[in-house]
Amino acid sequence: MPHHCPRGGNAARTTSELAALSEMRIALTRLAAPLPQIAADLAGVDGVVALTTNATTVMTEIGRYTGPCFATEPLALKAGEAALRVHLPSISATLAVERQALSRSPCSVQFFSPEGAALHKTILTSITDDYAFAELTQGWSIPAGEASGATPARTEVRVLDKPADPRCWRGRDLAFHLDSLFLDGGIGRRATLPDWGDDHAWSVEPELAVHLLRLLTEIRAPVATMVSNAAFAQIHQGAFDDIRQIGPVIRLCSEGCTISIDFNEIDEVWVTRFDAGGRAGHLIELYDWRFHCVAQFTEFGANGHLSRFWGQTVRDMPRRGRNAAS
């Protein structure tokens, strides 16, 4: 399917969702409380929809909001649970957005980049009363501890590990590879891939990724699916229940989670190796024409048969020539 404009033709244009919200005269409250405090308050709320987007992919998950882990911390994946990994310095603004009566949109908490892009939204479908939302958010508009005079608790922010030598990216764990997408959406990571070596990173045709996703859905293989942007990586673990294609858009459904990928925007698919606890794991990585990594897939769990099947399947995918694309 052809693009509506030449690739890169609208790269200079940016749409600020933050500015759009302000122009719509929606009741907004800019939050000053630290994200860990907000996450702790949201942890007990039912009927939450967690939504993470980038320019090509959207992941939504319905359920109970759980506290996030932060960049550089260990990563623990559990079956049937969603996880949120956050790079705090990339978040410029956090807003409480009140319920819109005319459009029937629920209230939400939204996180924005310095450019005004919405990085993550926590939509609170179970809170239908404006006073209940005000009660939930009343302590977030001032820094933690300011009202009592106490010193606000600080969340330690460590510098992301992005080695200059591409060979130092090999043999690292999944947490490292997730964190490498923060700040620039994976542009720097993509630049290193051709220099990892043919046994550690290679490209395949994008159509093969679609066939692989169909196969994984058919056999209901447990998969870790990761959608990232400059500040958030939302992770879902579980088998796909259904896969549908509407034009160039592939939609994956899994236990209250939906992932939509516009394959019209996908230029490259890479297979990369990582350290999966003493054995070689393999990631399927989708890159759009901007060289942003918009989605990643891998197997997870302790099933040795599945691990071998996954590894053999991705290794057998025909390579897209030598890793010369850059």
Image (cartoon, helix red, strand yellow):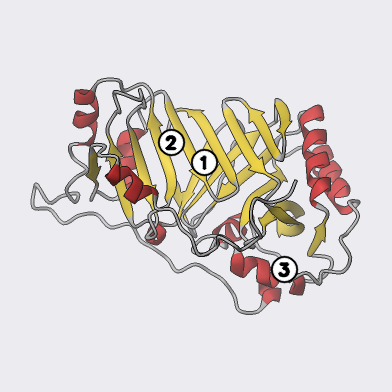
- Determine the residue positioned at 38% across, 51% down: 112
Residue position marked by numbered label 3 in the rendering: 193
Q: Quadrant of residue 176?
A: bottom right
Disc ID at residue 297: none
State the residue in front, 273 or 133.
133
**Identity of the amino acid at label 2?**
Thr
Q: CA distance from mark 3 to mark 1?
A: 26 Å
Q: Which label's residue is closer to the chain start, 2 or 1?
A: 2
Q: CA distance from mark 2 to mark 3?
A: 33 Å
Q: Quadrant of the C terminus?
A: bottom right
**Identity of the amino acid at label 1?**
Ala
Q: Quadrant of residue 47?
A: top left
Q: Position of residue 272 (x, y in %)?
A: 75, 59
- Determine the residue positioned at 80% across, 60% down: 203
Give the answer, above or below, for where 228 lies relative to 160: above
Say if residue 80 shows up in the picture.
Answer: yes
State the residue in front, 155 or 9.
9
Residue position marked by numbered label 1 in the rendering: 83
Q: Position of residue 128 (x, y in %)?
A: 30, 20
Q: Position of residue 182 (x, y in %)?
A: 51, 60
Q: Position of residue 158 (x, y in %)?
A: 42, 66
- Determine the residue positioned at 24% across, 54% down: 153
Disc ID at residue 66: 2
Q: CA distance from mark 2 to mark 1?
A: 7 Å
- Determine the residue positioned at 70% across, 31% down: 239
State the residue in front, 10 or 300.
10
Q: Are marks 2 and 1 in contact (CB under 8 Å)?
A: yes
